Image (cartoon, rainbow, N blue to C red):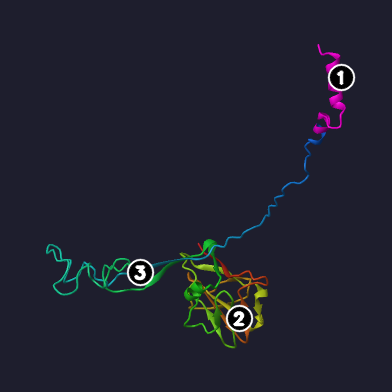
Amino acid sequence: MATQTSINNLSNVLSSSGNVQGNLKTSTITKSNTFSRIQIANSTVNLMDMPEIRETKSIAGDILLWGNSVFGIWNSFKWGNSSSTSFVLGNSLAGVLGISKLGSQSSSYQVREIINPNRIFRWLLSSAENTYWVDTGNTTATVTASTSIAFTTGQILQTNKLSTEYYNLSDAIFIINGSNITNSSNLTYYLSADNGSNFEAVTLNTLHTFTNVGKNLIIKIVASGNATISLKNSVGIRSPIAIDYEVTT
């Protein structure tokens, strides 16, 4: 049992200015109202399907082995000839490692298929696209990659074929944002479904039914005066030229 003296001593300690009670008060933990704030922004990204071009290269006429009168003759063990030309090793034309030359003559790649996802052709007119899509033999307008197509009186923009469909094209909509065109009344727009044999005048952003059907689509734009088609909208976002078309089945 605690003595009266011990109780008095404890009372004196707790009542003093430097007591434990005071120390406990000053040691109180305060909860802060400050907190980290994380803001998550939601945005939508539109993915654009672009045309897929498939090409093939014929090796017809390239004499690598079969038909060669000098080397590769069956049952003769002739894999080279007696002159400076060998079959593979040392041959400057055929079988050159790293450059896919399997024949003695070079041939160019030819378009086998142009696949437009959902039958929608989109053209952003990048440098690589210009080289491929623009028909340089018929185009006189000034095409500046990723920027604009500029026309003066009588100038033309014409493309190479933009599709290789199995069925005939039945109708199409030629789409260009009107706000991207200056002096639009100076431009006449044409589409061909038969690879350029017949061009039919169309109205932008309006469904056109082809009179002359075919499987290969071509664009032509003819200027009667100065005009420009910008390839970017007012805030600098690239805006494609597009053709949405259907086929008969």
Q: Check if mark 2's residue and mark 3's residue have beta carbons within 8 Å.
A: no
Circle 1 sits on which residue? 8
Q: Residue 179, percent across and down? A: 68, 74
Magenta residues span 1-23
Q: Check if mark 1's residue and mark 2's residue have beta carbons within 8 Å.
A: no
Q: Residue 177, percent across and down? A: 65, 72
Displayed quadrant of residue 223: bottom right
What residue is drawn where x is 57% and y is 88%? Answer: 154
Q: Main secondary structure of the magenta part?
A: helix
Q: Earlier in the sequence, mark 2 or mark 3?
A: 3
Is 14 included in the stretch rendered in magenta?
yes
Residue 159 — which label? none
Circle 3 sits on which residue? 57
Between the C-alphas of marks 3 and 1, the distance is 109 Å
Residue 188 — which label? 2
Label 3 element class = strand
Closest to the observer: 2 or 191?
2
- Is residue 5 placed above or below 198 in the rendered structure? above
For the N terminus, which image quadrant? top right
Total tally of numbered discs in the picture: 3
User: What amino acid is at disc 2?
Assistant: Thr
Q: Earlier in the sequence, mark 1 or mark 2?
A: 1
User: What amino acid is at disc 1?
Assistant: Asn
- Assess disc 1: are there few (<14), some (14-19) or many (≥20) residues with their C-alpha within 10 Å of its C-alpha: few
What residue is drawn where x is 85% and y is 16%? Answer: 5
Q: Earlier in the sequence, mark 3 or mark 1?
A: 1
